[in-house]
Each structure stands twice: as C-alpha cells, then as structure tokens.
Image: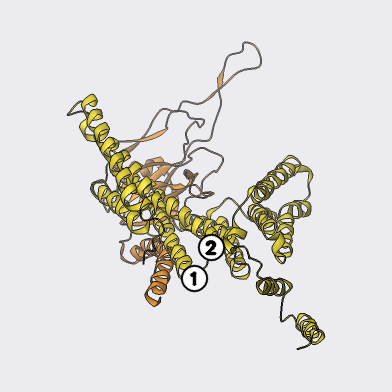
Chain colours: A orange, B yellow
Amino acid sequence: MEPIKKSKNISLIVGLAIPVLMIVAVAGSIYIPQFFAPKPQYDFLYTNDYYGGPYGAQLYEVRNGRVVKNPPVLPLQDSSAPPYVAKPVPAPEPQLFRYDVKNDMSKEVAFEEAQNFSLTTDQKSPDGFEFRDGSRDGDFFPFGRGYDYNVKYLIGHGISRKLNISVNQYQYNPVRFLGWIKN
Amino acid sequence: MEKQELLQEIRAAAADKKILRDEMIAAYDAGVGVPTAHPSLLKRMNIADVLYFIGGAIVFIGIAILVGQHWDELDMPTRILATLGSGIAAYIVGVLLSRDERFGVVGTAFFFLSALIMPVGLSVVFDAAGLEVGSAGMQSVIAGILLVAYLASFFVFPRTLFIVFSILFGTWLFFSFTSFLILNNPHLATAEFFEYRVLAVGLAYVFLGYALREAVATTGESHEEYSALASWLYAGGVALFLGAALALGGWSPNQNAFWEVIFPGLVFGVIFLSIYLHARSFLAFGSVYLMAYILKITAEYFSDTLGWPLALVLAGLCLIAIGYGAFRLNQNYLVKGVGEVRP
C-alpha cells in the first residue's frame, strides 16, 4: 500500500508542479537575462508622420544613410462654394525625434541637424537590438493577442525594454522608425 | 436491556447527535436482513440527474440573456446583484441542499450554476471598480479567486464538480498569468509560447488523471465519478499534449526539426502507455495523431519528390496499418485486461 500511496502522491505533485515550473521558467527567462544583457548603445531616429495622415506619402525617408525630406503633398479639401475646386489644407508638419537609449528619452531634432546623422536602416542595430511594436493588452485567455502600435520596445539579447515614447493614441501606428544613428 | 431502556438510550444518543437517523435505520435493516444498495448505485447518474444539470445550464443562459438585454438600464448595484448575487445565492442553495442526501444531486446542480455565474459576477464587480477586466492581470486575479474558492469548497464538500472547476479555473489562471508575465516582453509573445503552454497543461492533466485513478484504487471505495473524471483528464491531457507537440513541429520551410523528429517517439510512447494505464483514450488519440503526423510529413516532404498521388497511396497504407495495429492492441491488452488492477 505504501509504494502505491507514494506513487499517487508523486503523480499529484508532478501534475501540479508542471504548470508552476513553467511559470517559474517564464519568469526566469524574463528577469534573469536582464542582469546579463548588454545595454543598448545606439540611438535611433524616428518621425511621427503616421499612416493615412495629412501628408499621405511619407515626408521623411532615409537614402544612402542620410535622412531626406520629400516634397510635401498637402491634403486637399473639397470646396463648398463655386468654382468647387479642391484646395490644399495646411497641416502640421511631422517632426523628427532622436531617441536617447542611455537616458530613455526622446528629443525633437530639426531636419537640418538630422541631415548630419549617419543612419543604418537595418532591422537590427549594430549592437543587436531591434525596434518593435508591443503586444496588445486585454489578452483574454490564450486568444486575442495582437499588436499595440502605441507601445514600442527595444528587443535583443533575450530581453525587451519598453521605450519612453509618448504617442497620439488616436492615430494608427503613429511612430515610424527611420534608422539607427551610427555617429 | 429492556426495550424502554433501549429506546431511552437511542433518544439520548440522537439528542447528543451521536447517531444519525440514516445510521439507525441502516443498523435496523442490517439486523432484520434487508439488503442495502451498493454505494455505487446510489451515485450513478440517471436521467433526472442529467436534467438537473441541463436545467442549471439553462438557468445560467436565461440570466445571461436577461442581464445582457437590459444591461444599459440597470444601475451598478443591480448589475452586481444580478450576477455575483445570483452566483452566491446559488452556492448557498447548494450548501443547504447538500445537507440532505436526498437532494445531493440537486445541490450539485446549484453548485454548477454558481460556478458558471461567479466569473461573470466577479468581472462585473471589478469593472464597477474601474479596473480593466479584459486584461491578463485582472483575468489572473479573477481566476485565482475562483480557484481558491472552489478548491476550498472541495475540501468542505468532497464533490467531483469542485475538482472539475478547480482544474478549469487553475488552467485559466495558468494561461492568464503567463500572458500577464510576457505582456511587456514581446520577444516571448510567439505562437510557440502558446503551444508550449498547451503542452504543459496536457502533461499536467495526464498526471492529475493518474493521481486520481490511483487514489480511487487505494481507497478501496467505489468512486465512479472520480474514475470518470480521471478518464476525461487522460483524454483531454493526451489530446492537448500531442496536439501541441505536432504544432511545435511547424511546417516546412519553418519547421522545428527537434519536434518533428521526436514526435513519433512521443506517439509510440503514448500508445504503449495505453496498455500500462489501461486507457483507451491514449490508444485512440495516439493512433489519430500518428495518422495526422504521417499525412503532415508526406505532404511536407514527399509530395514533390514522389509525387502527390504516390505519397497519398503510401500514407493511406500506413493509416490502414496503424488502424489495424490499434485494433489488435485494444483486443489483446485492453479488452482482455478489463478488471485487472495495475500497480
């Protein structure tokens, strides 16, 4: 009887321990690498011209490692009076920002200053980090996971670091990554 | 002992609650030779019992529809009363009815109703408090509260229903808490992470089913409902485990070679375990998943080389062989082994 009772207890303990161990393993894989992962070294440049925004086509882009400014294409608004010709509507110009990874903060930079940056548009920075969207909160049970474009992360070396970027939550994907600043 | 003295002794024992009415009647019946029903017969579900539970489910649906249709018209206290209040009321009714063995199953039906309504009630309460109920964190809190409540209920009222809902709430807590952990860590939020969680849950179910079966075997009492639950845990556990293992193999060109190579070993291990555990579900699911694996592999790797029709012919022959093998295993080891007690 005693070996059978031990067998019953062991199987119950193992059955309950499996999910607990998995939780411990997940927590460990999140927090332990943070002690050993290197800190990001490369700042990056981004802009807040959003998809479907007033400028339609993207105002800023990176060519040959430098940021360039495309001719603005202002949105048109239909006229309600004769001769009913659509006119361009003034819209606030998108801004450029430099994210300081050491201090976890964004700083707006003028286009003239940004032109002096040497940029790389690789998905990964030279020190192995990637700029990525967050996951949507509100994950009900195991289903319903999606992207949260209002939250951005630096991911690399087994860790995720939430970025301190404030965005307009009413715009779709309001932050556009331009490139890693090499100098 | 004179008859009057004996009756006086019985009155005194009943007043002190040293003896129950049923015990006294059973002793009298044993004395006069009246055959008593086997305990397992008393616990077997009949149509009336099934109707109790169906009725409980329909009551839940009715409450849900009533509240849902008039949700905007109800103020917050009424919403909480209609949901959490109903759940607590059903639980109390279950407790009261459980005190009388004649209404035991009816009491269980009310416990069932309470278990369905309580999650909704707690969600309404937390929503009223201004918390985001749909978030992984709040789901973890709700699941944790319900798990503790129903686990404690099992120790007070040892009913299978409380084990079932403890397992369900525990599973819910596991998924929601792990989702909460990876919320700010999108490098872990992959499809594989979900599959690994399902793998862990499936394995846990199998071990819990084994523990339950062993507990029934060692107590020497007839607990058919516990055995039935163990069978369901075996079936659910092996289905989840093998399903997750198959999914982890992926699909070419993004396949995971480790899981694709190890999967046949897992399946054969499950099939052989069916003999040791006398679990037909292991044999059934093992066979089905082996067939699924063969179809997957032929479609992935051989449809271009051998030609799709020839690959299908080979796969079909393999399926026939597997089906025959499963039938023979069942006949030789499971059917003949019915009634044997495995250590």
Q: Mark 1 highlights which residue?
A: B219
In the image, residue B138 lies at what x, y percent?
58, 57
Pick whichever, A115 or B136, lies toward us.
Answer: B136
Q: Residue at x 53, y 56 (%)?
A: B168
Tell me: B17 left or right of A183.
right
Instruction: Kindly indicate the quadrant of the structure image that contains residue A82.
Output: top right
Q: Is residue A66 shown above or below B159?
A: above
Give residue A117's mark. none
Q: Residue at x 27, y 54 (%)?
A: A127
Q: Is residue B18 shown above or below B76?
A: below
Q: Amino acid at mark 2?
A: His
In the image, residue A157 lies at what x, y percent?
30, 56
In the image, residue A42 lies at what x, y percent?
32, 53
Badge 2 vs badge 1, beta-carbon distance below 8 Å? yes
Q: Amino acid at mark 1?
A: Thr
Tell me the element at label 2: loop
In the image, residue B30 lies at what x, y percent?
65, 72
